[in-house]
């Protein structure tokens, strides 16, 4: 880890320490197992199946999640990584976080051969939500590459509506628009002259713009006080500079997921 990386992360880590709960605080958490059918990478023609375990832990204002937030007792805990609540009320919240971006291996799909790997990095996140009407909310997140490894900036905006179909059965629909900064777009969807020679793809230099729009539907069912089941489809349509990338073989894709969680 470079000195520059440490200097970039110190303010965030210091803030986590400052806001850590003092005295006795309640622990809560969940373990999950989620199966997905999704494209090999965003824009790939081929899709595959994956099964991943997850963990969620909350201590006061501090949360840590590897994707198990859907099983948390509080409904506002869906983001991955390490997070801290800055403000929290009935109609809005604001948080800071850190999460690992695992990058992308060129061996993941034949279409990526010669493109090289996208380096893993740590992303800093500022996020918030506003519940502007009963069962309606809008969320926004801005993340940036803390180590300057080509990850750039990403902004996503999400509109969500929740219906309680039954006392323990909730239907959620959402629309998420994702925007990528110029450096992010170049790293994930661009093709440099060197990459063009190795891969055979034409040179492409995308600019800042919309990456994709995702429409999702999910049903969450609680069984007793401890068990949670969730599942549903999602449809993603790539847009803007990302959709025009020579790496994109298919602009539209369906995703399916199902999971089970146990609270503690």
Image: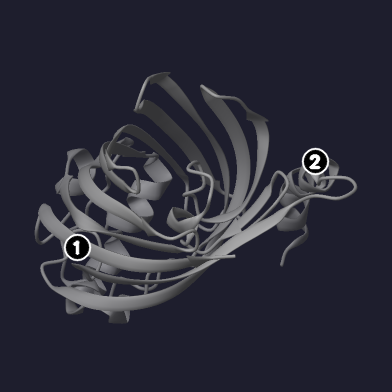
Could one spot residue 113 in this view of the protein? no
Give coordinates of residue 120: x percent, y percent. Answer: 50, 67
Left or right position of 22 against 253: right
Q: Residue at x 21, y 73 (%)?
A: 199
Of 206 and 102, the residue lying toward us: 102
Of 221 and 246, the residue lying toward us: 221
SS at mark 2?
helix
Tag on residue 19? 2
Left or right position of 85 against 165: right
Query: For the image shown, how many numbered marks are present on the structure?
Result: 2
Mark 1: few, some, or many residues within 10 Å (few <14, many ≥20)? some
Q: Residue at x 57, y 29 (%)?
A: 93
Of 214 and 21, the residue lying toward us: 21
Q: How is the image coloured?
A: one colour
Q: Read off the residue under disc 1.
A: 256
Give coordinates of residue 143: x percent, y percent. Answer: 51, 43
Give coordinates of residue 206: x percent, y percent. Answer: 27, 44
Give coordinates of residue 21: x percent, y percent. Answer: 82, 45
Could one spot residue 25 in this view of the protein? yes
Mark 2: few, some, or many residues within 10 Å (few <14, many ≥20)? some
Q: Quadrant of the N terminus?
A: bottom right
Q: Earlier in the sequence, mark 2 or mark 1?
A: 2
């Amino acid at each position: 880890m470079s000195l520059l990386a440490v200097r970039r992360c110190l303010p965030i880590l210091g803030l986590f320490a400052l806001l850590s709960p003092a005295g006795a605080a309640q622990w809560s958490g969940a373990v999950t197992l989620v199966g997905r059918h999704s494209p090999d990478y965003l824009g790939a023609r081929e899709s595959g199946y994956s099964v991943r375990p997850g963990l969620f832990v909350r201590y006061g204002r501090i949360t840590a999640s590897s994707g198990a937030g859907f099983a948390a007792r509080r409904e506002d805990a869906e983001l991955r990584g390490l997070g801290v609540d800055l403000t929290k009320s009935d109609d809005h919240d604001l948080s800071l976080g850190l999460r690992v971006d695992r990058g992308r291996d060129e061996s993941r799909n034949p279409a990526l051969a010669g493109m090289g790997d996208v380096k893993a990095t740590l992303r800093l996140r500022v996020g918030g939500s506003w519940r502007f009407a009963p069962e309606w909310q809008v969320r926004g997140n801005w993340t940036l590459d803390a180590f300057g490894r080509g990850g750039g900036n990403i902004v996503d905006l999400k509109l969500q509506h929740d219906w309680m179909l039954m006392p323990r059965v909730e239907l959620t629909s959402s629309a998420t628009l994702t925007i990528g900064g110029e450096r992010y777009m170049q790293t994930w969807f661009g093709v440099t002259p060197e990459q063009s020679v190795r891969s055979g793809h034409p040179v492409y230099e995308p600019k800042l713009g919309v990456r994709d729009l995702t429409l999702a539907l999910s049903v969450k069912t609680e069984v007793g006080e401890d068990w949670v089941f969730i599942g549903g489809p999602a449809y993603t349509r790539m847009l803007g500079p990302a959709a025009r990338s020579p790496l994109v073989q298919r602009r539209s894709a369906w995703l399916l997921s199902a999971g089970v969680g146990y609270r503690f």
